[in-house]
Amino acid sequence: MKLENRVALITGAGRGIGQAIAIAFAREGADLALVARTASELDETAQMIRAAGHRIITITADVSQPADVERAAGQALEAFGHVDVLVNNAGVQPPIGPLWQNDADEWMRAVAVNLFGPMLCIKAVLPGMMERKRGKIINLSGGGATGPRPNFSAYAASKAALVRLTETLAVELAPYNIQVNALAPGAINTRMLAEVLAAGELAGAELAPAQYRAQSGGTPVELAVRLAVFLASADSDRLTGKLIAAPHDDWQTWDVARIAALNESPWYTLRRIDPITVGPLVSK
């Protein structure tokens, strides 16, 4: 098992991608601290996992609230002694619609959950990881991180910022053998799809594809789950500072040599493409 004797703290673990990652981590041998705002959803996830015989605790908390995050991290450390893997999966999508129609408080709430939440969780687990000189941090990216996403400005901006935070922390934490990567799961049919459908015309050009996905099915969640296991396990040791798309990138073929090469390149990062980042253009 790839995660035996590892402890993972997973936010947003009550449903969707977070729940699927939690189940997969348990199957790979991990002990789990599961965090979400809704206790009943956490209990459902826990019931699906406890049969596997691994240790698991559930913690009701809002990752945008510093006191909640400190309490959650404290409970995880009290139960298990340390945290090896942090999965920042909790996220919200609204407000949906043009910026001038967005509620400002709702916009700031999205940034608080999607960006400040991961920052708070990372700060909470870092002291132990740094002391032990080992750790894996996985941040869930999302639509708009690498390009404009009209009518979803709060979500897009917060996810782009989260990827740059990922890259920055990867450099800061490299001396401590802590790898930080961002996972782009693809267009998975979760509650966020229902939010797009409910928004109707406010979703703009995304409404028609969402309606099609609702009928045909989106990206299989298993792809994101397998990538999460890869990033949490020794298979990805030394890979850091990357944004990896579960359904599109060839991460399943990466070996030690490929990881070493990627770490020395701008591939799979947020970069402006110009002579400064890729070298001077050569004209014939």
Image: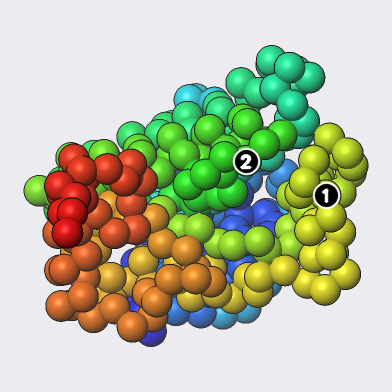
Q: Residue at x 27, y 43 (%)?
A: 274
Q: Looking at the picture, does residue 238 appear above or below residue 131? A: below
Q: Residue at x 71, y 34 (%)?
A: 151
Element on which disc 1 rests: helix
Q: In this view, does 168 lie to the left or right of 69?
A: left
Quadrant into which the C terminus falls: bottom left
Considering every residue shown, the one lying at the far front of the view is 284
Q: How far apart are marks 2 and 1 (CA)?
A: 13 Å
Q: Which of 49 and 3 is in front in this view?
A: 3
How are the colours assigned in the image?
Answer: rainbow
Q: In this view, does 4 lie to the left or right of 37?
A: left
Q: Nearer the viewer, residue 109 or 271?
A: 271
Query: Which amino acid type corresponds to the residue marked 1 in the rendered image?
Result: Leu
Residue 207: mark in rendering? 1
Query: Which amino acid type corresponds to the residue marked 2 in the rendered image?
Result: Arg
Q: Which comes before the other along the chain, label 2 or label 1?
A: 2
Q: Is residue 106 left or right of residue 160?
A: right
Q: In which quarter of the image is residue 73?
A: top left
Q: Visible in this render: residue 107?
A: yes
Q: Visible in this render: residue 5?
A: no
Give how far across and how far down residue 280 sits, in percent: 15, 47
Q: Is residue 134 left or right of residue 29?
A: left
Q: Name the residue under label 2.
A: 149
Q: Which residue is drawn at 78% across and 19% down?
A: 101
